[in-house]
Image (tube, rainbow, N blue to C red):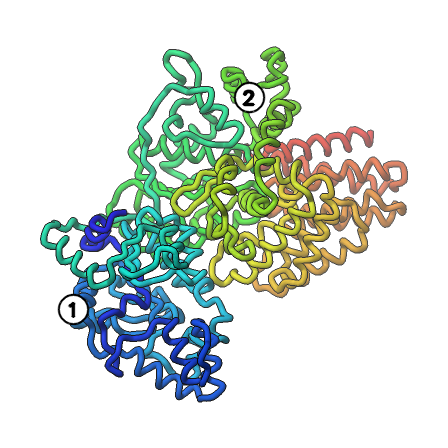
Amino acid sequence: MELKEAIEHAIDGNAILFIGSGFSYGSTNLCGDIPLSGRQLAKKLYKLSGIENGNDNPSLASQMYLKKFSQNNLSSLLLNMYTIKQPAPHHILIASINWRRIYTTNYDNLFELSANQAGKAVMPVILGDPPEQYISNSDVCVHINGFIQRLKQGDLVRNFKLTFESYLRDDFTPSKWRTVFQNDISLARAVIFIGYSMYDLDIQRVIDSEDVKHKSVFIASPDLDTDSPDGTILPLFGNLHQIGVEAFGNEISVVRTEYVPHARPKEFLALEKVMAPAPIDEVKNSDAERLFLYGDLKQELISVTSSFPNSSSGRFYLVEREGIATAEQLISEQDIIFTSDLGNGKTIAMEQLAVNLVKKGWNVFRLLEDSRQLRIEVDRLLKLDEPLVFLADLYIPLLDVIDFISLRRQGKRIRFALAARSNIHEAYLDRLEMSLRTTDLAEIDLNRLSSKEAKTFAKLIDSFGLWAEFSAYSDNEKKKLLVEKCDSQIHQILLQLYSSPQISKRIEDIFQQIDDDVRDIVIAAFILKGTGLTIIKQYLNDLLNDSPLLRLSNHDRMPLRLLWNEMSGKMILKSSVLAEYYLTRLARASDVTRVLLEMFKNAHKLQALDKTYIYFMRSVMSFSALRRLLPKIGFPAATITFYEQIQTYKFAQKNAHYWLQYAIARLSLEDDLDVIEKYFISAYSFANKRDGYDTFQIDNHYARFLLTRATKSISCDEAFNYFKESCRLLKKQMENEMKYYPYRVATNVSDFFLAHRDSLSVQQRTEVLEFCGFVLKRVASLPKNTREHRHVLDSKRAMEFVLASAQ
């Protein structure tokens, strides 16, 4: 960005100012001098300590100073050094601009004093101050390393970043102000750095993760050596102008005389307004190939569906799922929730639904984060009295936001269109209903294509020649492949296509381009995708050791571009199925397990900063998630290693969810049943210590465990006792719930009956048959959509089989 344009954005109130020690040039402190930079301060402290040849590290220099003098001496020196007596005219001029917000690594009060002399009041804050008390006010200067006028005894370690001990801590990353800073630079039209050297790794991480180089401007000293570290590093992050702070002030004066300010538009940061893209209807082979192989959805083609194909060729880009039409019909009266397992089409269905609703006159907004800013933006929308739909492709981290909106939408035409993985939605449905403040929501399961959709999907693959070695199949054989072998699931269809020699070779070639030192980033990105999280640079830098994205060379970035698009601060992986294919079939179990444990460790450290990290830990603890994250070769050992390693973390140790998932894992791996029972006991124990904890999920899986134990028991009487206890739990759930979960478990009764049919007493056999009759009676009373669920149908067939076998 050119300097003139950046200044114009600043005049409009659309720029962030970040000032370092070079900003102080021309000011006067209480000693009558210009405040020292960090490097100059280090040399002064070394000299006062009697060390002639010290380095320019202020943290080490202050430590040497404190070996000879007290903290009070150092505090007094700093107060005189960084309390400003008089700013220069250019400081007052710069402070007169209506900045969106000001950030500084300086200790001094120069900006606040300059603003005061410009007729403005600017509030100084430090990282320990709660952002929610200040964020609504743009006239705030955030002192990242501490503020001189708040320096108290003991603050040289706690709230003032100078001493060696204080530098050992990373105060910025876990601070809520980091999130505010990320949001600010993302929303700003320009980010202007004055006299800042970018030496701070914490700041580098954020600047890099938000991809703001195109709108960043650095004002540096005219005598900066371009071959120096600063001269080399700064151009990597923005446009470098070696004019100095005084000349920058003069540039502001010049631009002000010529430029007519624009009113700041009401922008959205925590919300994203969905717009109908300019349509095109010609679908190229490359468009379909990128969609199928990489999940790269072309927005302009969203409307080219099987219902509205290209007028000349008859080809279409997407299958119009029946669930989308259902959602469009119901959304006037109900909230919508799309559910599916990974890769079965809910994200694309959400995109199609969003565009269709916009065309029908709804104002559609995506919920991007749980923040105070979002509440401000939502409150602004609620005053418009317009039809609104709020979208969230992963609603779990946004439950508090959903509750906030639900509380305020009474009497208004406001609906939610949400989505989640099926297994995650099962666990969170009760909480979702509480947040929506209604149980009247339309749950639309997208896991399986209908017969008509499967036929249309086969036609879509056919029209773009993506069948590979299945090309010679007849139309009926292709449909049979999709319906029977792939179970009518898009996820399975894609894996089938990926497994064909022609396509699998292309996929392997892509990953062979990635060097070993970049492979951990790829694995981490795919793990994030597997949990349903958006792949953001910040998450990768936070969850992997040493912020590896900061050190990527252009050579390393090239193959990664085949896997995701780099956008403003986000890297959007294009295919969750491709991620699963790589993790489970191409990666090494030792590599994936190591990276997953590293990510869990760092998420555990950062859980207080962002709820996303709690969601991440809870997600990867789920055994169903591990099935899609860990390689098939070595899966049992990798699974046990993961659960045993995370058991040392506080988040898992007393977590009922952890012990339940570990029990499910060991049960699925057919381990020692006595050991598994101890894990269930632990799950119940920790659940009972939490007020209001619903043990429905534990009961459901424990009932399955009991039926497994009953089936494997040698003693018929012992087996029957396990069966009775399982039935007690299942009956309770069937009587109190209208969901399919207890029926899925009850299907296992047929295995128990076959194992012990010849040994059961007349009374025992009668009780088994009575339970089967009870299940069938309950099935008949279920709502139609639950009654027709595949797990309920399987259970019904199993009960009928037992009754028929007993004749």
| Residue beneath the point at 36% across and 80% down | 151
Q: Amino acid at mark 1?
A: Pro
Residue 482, by quadrant, is top right
Vertical arrangement, residue 319 with respect to residue 380, above or below: above
Q: Residues within 10 Å of mark 1 (few under 14, many from 20)?
A: some
Q: Is disc 2 in contact with disc 1, using a CB cutoff of under 8 Å?
A: no
As rendered, which of 747 and 466 lies closer to the eye? 466
Left or right, 775 with reference to 541 = right
Q: Is residue 664 left or right of residue 222?
A: right
- Name the residue beneath numbered marker 1: 89
Residue 554 x %, y %: 47, 43
Q: Which residue is mark 2?
A: 454
Question: Which residue is found at the position 48% from the left and 57% from the top?
Answer: 611
As drawn, 355 above or below 369: above
> Which x, y percent locates residue 407?
37, 53
Q: Let me know if residue 531 appears in the view.
A: no
Residue 395's disc number = none
Extreme residue toward the left, this view: 257
Say which amino acid is labelled 2: Ala
- What percent of the width, then of the height, locates residue 754? 83, 35
SS for callout 1: helix
* Rendering coords of residue 282 (x, y %): 38, 19
